[in-house]
Amino acid sequence: MSITTTVVHFIPSPTSHLQNNLNLSPRTWLYNASNKDAVSKILLLGQTCDSIFRNLRAQFLQQRIQHVLGQQENNDGEFCDCIDVEIKKRKRLKKDPGVSREKSKHNIDVYNIVNHSHNEPPTVMMGDPIGVNPCSLDAIKEVLLQLKQTAIAHDRHWTIIGCDGLPYHLASKVIDANEELHDILLQPGLGHYEINLTKAFIKLTWDVVGEDLAKMLGFRTPKALNACKQANDHHKAWQMIEILLYGLGDELLLPYVRTCLDSGTEPSADGFFSWSQDAVNPNYRFLLECIFTYGVALHYFRAGVRRNNSRVMLASRMKLSPLFYGLHKINYQRIDFLDLKSRVLAPPEIANYINDHESFTVSGHPSKGEGCDFILEANNRASKMWLPPGSPSQDHWLRVCRNLDRLKKIEIDFNQTLGVKESKDSIYHCNSNVEITEWRKHIRESEYLLAPCQARNHQSLSGIALDADLADFSAKCKGNRLSYLAEIEATNELKTATNLEPVFILANDKVSYQKIDNKTKAEIGSMIRGILQQIQDADTDLDMYESLHKKWEREIKNATKPVLISFYKEACMALESFDVASVDEDITLEDADFPSSVSRN
């Protein structure tokens, strides 16, 4: 096995001289700053972002309301649309009449709904690879020291290093513990941030409607459904989210639009919010919050990243972040706080620089912006193409990385000789109109969202009972986040939260969670040892394993049954986070990427 850490340098255009100013180094304003002070500023930022997001959501709703309104036809005093017509035709023929397929991709820019702030494309250069496998805190420290030595040279006094989730989680601990690394400002990669937000949204909706959609799209075997549930393919997961967003969104708006048509009033976003306050159907209320808060926020987060619009990106991200606290995304709870801390405490010059360079467009197209982590991965894949078969040596890596730009030029020249052209001025988007229509037909035929103002049992689309408190999941997620911040404010310490209230999706989930109460102390102890072994075997966060294991041996092992149960739940939450993290990043510690500035191979 060949393990190395590849390095990519980003030089924005136009260049700045901020790193020449010693007073702007993060050691002067970040690492000695109080977490308590940061919390109050983060809460203020949240209020600003909430106002921005409300305007974005109203814009989205108004556009979808007009779309649904345009589909309605008055048929002898009863309003109907193309979905009703197709359903009637299907019932009359007693079979699906089939649908005309459209092109799978079309040339359309779906992200120009927000303004872009891109400058000229950055200069992206491969650096010399570092022959270290960053699979431990000591190894990550060595990588960071070498990066610091490379980046902080001549007149520069500090630098920025970007990471995806797991390396950021570990590297932040290394930097905090080593003062010689306080000249490094750590930033999370927006590409992996989007991946984890997507996974959280799929996890939230899977048992309710997601699995039914996956089966409709052709994912039927257990293996295929599990891959879909884990969102292993980000592109397919995003297509599913778009179908949920537009399909369910239009069906949620339909009762309101037809109510307005019956009463002769003009439908609007404000009118819909007022009307929806009377909804008591828990199925409707849950999806209303899911789609028009978290689904819309994901939509604008992606657009904000593509267009390098920090205002839109950050407002959407702040609206989405409570999912990390309700779905036990432990790593991203820490990442969310640390990144926001650096933003709210940064001097104006640094804050403006970060806002202006959230993402970069290598091609120059204003809607093709990406986080540095995804640009790095593209270069990482390109470098692997030129490696010899088998296990490459460090010399192989060095030669490829130092010559990658030349090799790319050879590839471009060769393609031009063959007449193969790559268009940098076009942007293609997957056309899911047929799937959205079929999904709307499926929802309407099931009468799942029928009568939003009538009380019904809370159940999934396929009829499985859901947890009684699920309709209010959003309040629980937000409450968990506030509890997390309150604990930081009270103790001035950043540590894994153990008192967050779990969000249960299915009714049986709560039963399973509470079932341990019936077991003996010996049985609970055995279960705890099994969980700790799984955490150790996962080899994801050795620091967390050592902390839990030490606590078990010294404090918990001979404690009372309630203490054992509490620790068991804490260990289960940690294990769930690690299991998800290993999938969330699509990596393991042996082959993980260390994006934005470095990548591991």
Image: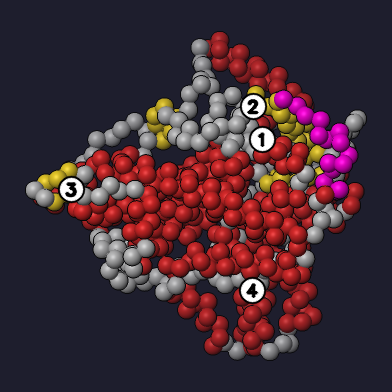
Three-letter code, disc 1:
Asp
Quarter of the picture containing the C terminus is: top right
The tally of labels here is 4
Which quadrant would residue 380 be assigned to in this image? top right
Q: Determine whether the residue tagged by mark 2 lies in a helix, strand or loop.
A: loop
Q: Is residue 445 visible?
A: yes
**Dominant secondary-structure state across the stretch colored magenta:** helix
**Label 2 or label 3, whichever comes before in sequence order:** 3
Closer to the chain start, of discs 4 and 1, is 1
Q: Which residue is mark 4?
A: 499
State the separation of the CA atoms marked 4 and 1: 37 Å
Distance in Å between CA atoms under marks 3 and 4:
50 Å
Taking the image as drawn, is residue 576 in sight? no
Q: Secondary structure at mark 3?
A: strand
Residue type (three-letter) at the residue carrying disc 4? Asn
State the extent of the magenta-drawn residues as a range.
14-28
